[in-house]
Image: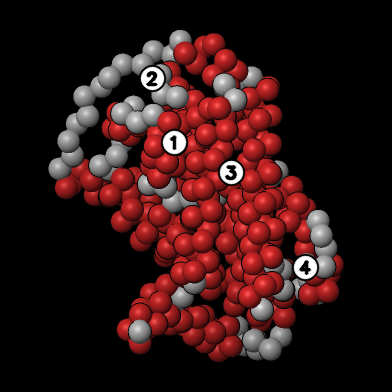
Amino acid sequence: MNIFNWVNDQLFKMKWLYNLVRILVEEIFNLSLETRIGTSIHFFIYDVIKIFILLSVLIFAISYIQSYFPPERTKKILGRFKGIKGNMLGALLGTITPFCSCSSIPIFIGFTSAGLPVGVTFSFLISSPMVDLASLLLLMSFFGAKIAIAYVIVGLILAVIGGILIDKLGMEKYIKDYVYGVKDTDVNIEEMIPRDRVNFAKDQVKDIFDRVWKYILIGVGVGALIHNWIPQSVIENILGQNNPFAVILATMVGVPIYADIFGTIPIAEALIAKGVGMGTVLAFMMGVTTLSFPSLVMLSQVVKKKLLGVFLAIVTIGIIIIGYSFNIFSFLLK
């Protein structure tokens, strides 16, 4: 247990980095951590460096593993399963694919044009941006293993149920006609040698870094603002347990924001420090990663309005239920 705590503290929470940044702020910048400006600068520098280190290491390691599962192979695997097994597998495969909500859309088109059941493809579409291995490990470093595992589990459940409902409602006819006309050919999957996999992992790190770095800076900046400058009473009045609409509000606030989970975690960290319920925070994070406005615009070019509305309703209601359930469960444990 002591070894686990040491690994968690030094490798995931990076207490060594926390202390180094503290020395930088106090000795070099000559600012006390007892002041708002000192604490804000410490929060910003520490979280930015920590997230970038974790992002680079985790994405490299996970992308190396993911090099064994290109879209062509994923499609072949999914094509073997039907019904709820297909939905479960689609959701699980979504966890090992490094796609944000927007970049998942082209994969969705490929799967649909290949004849995979629409429910299976939607399970993948929900799971892919919301839950992945990197988010699991990153959440563990900030909130601990229990919260991280719970986030992944409820995300997978939502993806499976969402896909099943869309399948049962017979939504295939609401896919735009041109999607089925997209040429789909079985390509030979080239086997990579270890050097190719390393290069693939490096490219994934660079690609994801280029896409998310600005959102990380914005997220950490907002987190520092919430953490040190907005009074706790204001946050509690808006998103606290006493506001019965807190979860709904957090979900709606998350929708217009386009960011990966890496950019939402600093905001979530600051909200939790201000006393916001874990369920409310999770609803915000899920709203950002799964229902971002740009991804909905892209999806509207692929599916008809009725299917888009059904997808939006299922995921939104699911996120709200998850948020309230977490808050109630946390309250009962107190």
Residue 239 point in image, percent of width and height: 77, 63
Residue 84 numbered mark, or none? 1
Residue 323 point in image, percent of width and height: 66, 57
First of labels 1, 4 by sequence position: 1
What residue sits 34% from the left and 27% below the top? 79
For numbered disc 2, what is the local secondary structure? loop
Do residues under tags 1 and 4 come within 8 Å of each other at their CB atoms?
no
The residue identified by callout 3 is 290
First of labels 4, 3 by sequence position: 4
Real-space Cα distance between discs 4 and 2?
46 Å
Is the residue 210 above or below the residue 191 in the image? below
Real-space Cα distance between discs 1 and 3?
21 Å
Residue 327 point in image, percent of width and height: 68, 65
**In what quadrant of the picture does the N terminus appear?**
bottom left
The residue identified by callout 4 is 241
The residue identified by callout 2 is 114
Is the residue 243 above or below the residue 261 in the image? below
